[in-house]
Image: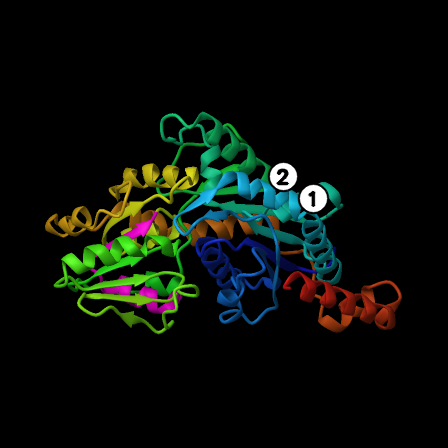
Amino acid sequence: MSGKTILIAVQGEGRGHMTQALTLYHLLKSEGREVCCVLVGGNPLRSQAEFLRKQLPVPVVQVYSPFFVRRGDRGISVSATLAQVIWRIPDLFRSLRILHKLVQFHRPVLIIQCYEPLVALYRLTHAFPGKLLAIAHQYAFLHESFRFPKGHILSRWLLKKYTRFTSFGADCMLAISLYPMDSSRIKKLQIIPPIIRPELLEMHPEQQSYMLVYLVNPGYLKDIISWSVEHPEVEIHCFTDTSRLHIRSGGSGLSGTGLTVHGLDAQLFLQYLKGCRVLVSTAGFETVCEAVYLGKCCMVVPVEGHFEQYSNALDASMIGVVSSQWFDLDKAWNLIIEKVEPNDQFSDWVNSCPDFIRQIIRELLPVDIGPSIELSQRMQIIPGGVQQAVPQIIRATRDIRQSLG
């Protein structure tokens, strides 16, 4: 392994992991590291990879990887999700072949995976002489002091087993946490601060009069509409997947209410987050981190049947985030009465993240790992030279197109 390229593999369900991958890319570039490509796993019928393609100058390849199957537009179905994994085993092997061809071609010395199970399967089925770094907030679930919701014994066991599986073969696991934790008994497990996009760190928050809502599942929109009809004086901006709602992506106001519905737009969402009075969101991780960092009142609502989101909501209460079992906007709007003081400890914790990651990367990849290999040199390295390399690349491209449907 004489190159110094890095391949990033990211689980594409939800924006959190992809936002982290985007921030990691820029951090690596600032360190003089070369990222060869980004692999996005998930439902190939959804264009998750477009979020990264618009912002990264390197190839972004989308492939099939296990994803949650929705139960209607509000929750998830565990049984249907398991059935999907079994039914699509051929697609899973096709994705592994694509990943293998990317590794053969780029010869990365490091794979960084953001909770993408394809990398664990790859390590089970292929020899890889480089290093593997696993990064996700879910790895905090493996820490002895992490608090889970009471009950849900089977769900807790399955979540921890699956999380441990995704880290198979990792030289280091980075658990993103809302707060510092003591050292874990798991030697490879290290606690790091949230990875937040640089543009948000540079923002100067404002306190305007509107409520901001983020819905990972559009089925909850009817609850927001009902409340807005009763409270037309409250300005609400709601971001959700509008592809099945027949709503223009640029935003659409509902007559007789103060509600405007927007399609998913990362940059526009940040602008509204900067000025909102209160944020109401499904219980993801990244959005909560960003809101608390900007000093916003925040209420989270776990997606129905999603034990990980229940766990996220309980964990977020450790830094003052309010949770609710349903979209109780009365409760959320009353939060603005409470004066929210800036969480300086959380801000300091977040601001220390780049130093944590730089140190870990330097430990995994010493500076004397050799010169970067240019594209023409990589072509020559493949056995048989360029003439035999071209058919391999053509076949890889065909597989990628097939995986995208």
Seen in the image, is 336 located left or right of residue 109? left
Seen in the image, is 77 located left or right of residue 205? right
Toward which corner of the image does residue 244 lie, by quadrant? Answer: bottom left
Residue 265 on the magenta span? yes
Q: Which numbered circle lies on residue 123?
A: 1
Seen in the picture, residue 374 relative to 345 is either above or below; the reply is below
Q: Earlier in the sequence, mark 1 or mark 2?
A: 1
Residues shaded magenta: 264-282
**Residue 358 appears at what percent x and percent y?**
50, 53
Determine if residue 188 is in view: no
Residue 210 on the magenta span? no
Task: Residue at 66% x, 56% y: name it.
Answer: 368
What SS does tag 2 mark? loop
**Residue 289 appears at what percent x and percent y?**
34, 51
Tag 1 near tag 2, CB within 8 Å: yes
What SS does tag 1 mark? helix
Using the image as rendered, state which of residue 402 and residue 246 is in the foreground.
Answer: 246
Task: Residue at 35% x, 46% y: name it.
Answer: 283
Amino acid type, label 2? Phe
Within 10 Å of disc 2 (Cα), the crowding (few <14, some 14-19, many 20+) is: some
Q: Which residue is mark 2?
A: 168
